Image (cartoon, helix red, strand yellow):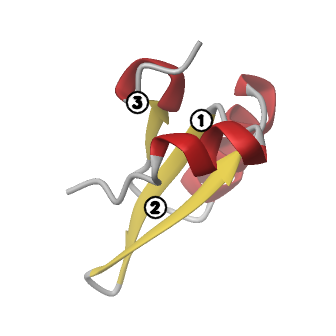
Amino acid sequence: MSILPNREFAQRKGWTHQVEWLDDGRPCFVRCTSGAEADTKADNLKKLGCNVTVIDLRDALQLH
């Protein structure tokens, strides 16, 4: 289950990607302003053993 931001707020903040994972069954996420930043965060979480999903907010929220 994704916890997506409000479309207009995400646009104002410049968020383009969201990285999601579970921590002790609790959903966690971080929002990023570039795909490269999201990839780096996802890679670091994977090294810690987390099951990570990267969401392109531009597609999910239909941002332009």
Amino acid type for the residue under numbered disc 2? Cys
How crowded pointer 3 is (Cα within 10 Å; few <14, some 14-19, many 20+) is rated as some
Compared to residue 25, the image places residue 63 above or below, namely above
Q: Position of residue 7 (x, y in %)?
A: 48, 41
Task: Name the mark on residue 6.
Answer: none
Mark closest to the chain's N terminus, 2 or 1: 1
> Are the residues at dot 2 and dot 3 in contact (C-beta closer than 8 Å)?
no
Mark closest to the chain's N terminus, 1 or 3: 1
User: Which residue is more in the foreground, 38 or 6?
Assistant: 6
Q: Position of residue 64 (x, y in %)?
A: 59, 12
User: Which residue is more in the foreground, 38 or 56?
Assistant: 56
Amino acid type for the residue under numbered disc 1? His
Residue at 59 percent across and 35 percent down: it is 17
Compared to residue 41, the image places residue 22 above or below, namely below
Compared to residue 63, the image places residue 43 above or below, namely below
Q: Secondary structure at mark 3?
A: loop
Q: Secondary structure at mark 2?
A: loop
> Are the residues at dot 2 and dot 1 in contact (C-beta closer than 8 Å)?
no
How crowded pointer 1 is (Cα within 10 Å; few <14, some 14-19, many 20+) is rated as many
* Residue lying at the far top of the rendered structure: 64
Of labels 2 and 1, the one closer to you:
1
* Residue lying at the far left of the rendered structure: 1
Q: Which residue is mark 2?
A: 50
